[in-house]
Image: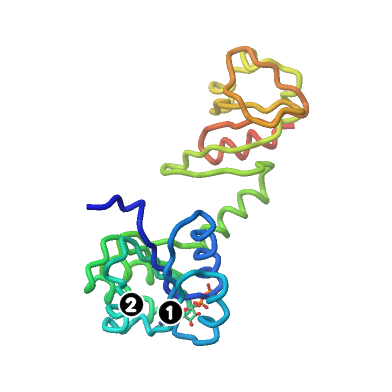
Amino acid sequence: DRNPDEGGIGVIGLGRFGCQLAESLAALGREVLAIDRDARKVQRWSTKLDQVAQADSTDEDALRQLDVGDLRRVVVAIGASVQASVLTVLALVELGVPQIWARATSAQHAKILSSVGAHRVIFPEAETGERLAHLIVSRMLDFAEFGDAFAVAKIHVPEALVGQATSEVRLLERYGIRVIGIRSPGEQQFRYVSDGLRLDKDSTLIVEGTIDDLQRFSTLS
Ligand code: ADP
């Protein structure tokens, strides 16, 4: 059996999200089969993507003719029509696609997608909105959140701590955060930090902790 990380990837629904996804996958060197029922969209994307096909993805036979059943992974990127997205997932289940990822636009939609057999449900709008909210209210430059509110963030050295040494500030005890990496002014790359690092004004840090602690820490002044 082939590695699921290799092989072609199907993207169904060339709306704004699906197009961006298909383009990014192609940029990563992956073979993409993009499908939409709208002939104008198929036409428009046929010059930018290697394989673009026009089909109604709720039609199992149409998908079979495109050999969608041979793909290891298919992302259903249809958002607006819950019915089309759910029926498409059903068709993919029937075809035996091993990894079906589906985009949900609401919690109910997500529940239905899971119950009909989507292996992974994604929420691009909700995730982007939540992410932006964190970036707007904090001074984090970037972050990634994992389960249980655990996160890793890129931040400037908080104003209140400029000039101090990490060994003196007891970051974990006082703020619940740990510094993983630092980039000093003029440096291109982050490096792992050792004990007793001094926090210079224009340094950038990579820190870990809960999202709330990181948010608070980034704004200490
Ligand atoms: P976005 O919010 O990312 O723009 P939309 O939900 O508006 O996404 O776009 C969905 C895309 O999926 C559209 O291009 C539409 O033509 C396509 N689509 C909708 N239903 C089907 C279907 N049954 N088969 C194939 N493509 C479909």
Side of 196 where 64 appears, left or right: left
Local SS, label 1: strand
Ligand 1 closer than 8 Å to the CB at disc 2?
no
Position of the C terminus, as image quadrant, is: top right
Q: Residues within 10 Å of mark 1 (few under 14, many from 20)?
A: many
Above or below, 70 relative to 46: above
Q: Name the residue at 51% across, 62% down.
A: 126
Q: Are marks 1 and 2 in contact (CB under 8 Å)?
A: yes
Q: Amino acid at mark 1?
A: Ala
Residue 212 vs 47, above or below: the answer is above
Could you tell me residue 181's position as x and y percent? 59, 27
State the image coordinates of residue 116 (x, y, percent, origin top left): 26, 71
Q: Depth check: give the residue in front, 113 or 130.
A: 113
In this view, the residue in front, 55 or 100, is 55
Coloring scheme used: rainbow
Q: Is residue 111 left or right of residue 156?
A: left
Q: Is residue 22 above or below residue 221?
A: below
Q: Is residue 115 visible?
A: no
Mark 1 / mark 2, whichever is N-terminal: 1
Q: Which residue is mark 2?
A: 66
Identify residue for label 1. Answer: 53
- The residue shown at (32%, 64%) is 100
Q: Amino acid at mark 2?
A: Leu
Residue at x 38% of width, y 81% of height? 84
* Position of 27 relative to 216 (above/below): below
Looking at the image, which is closer to me, 15 or 154? 15
User: Does mark 1 have its CB less than 8 Å from ligand 1?
Assistant: no
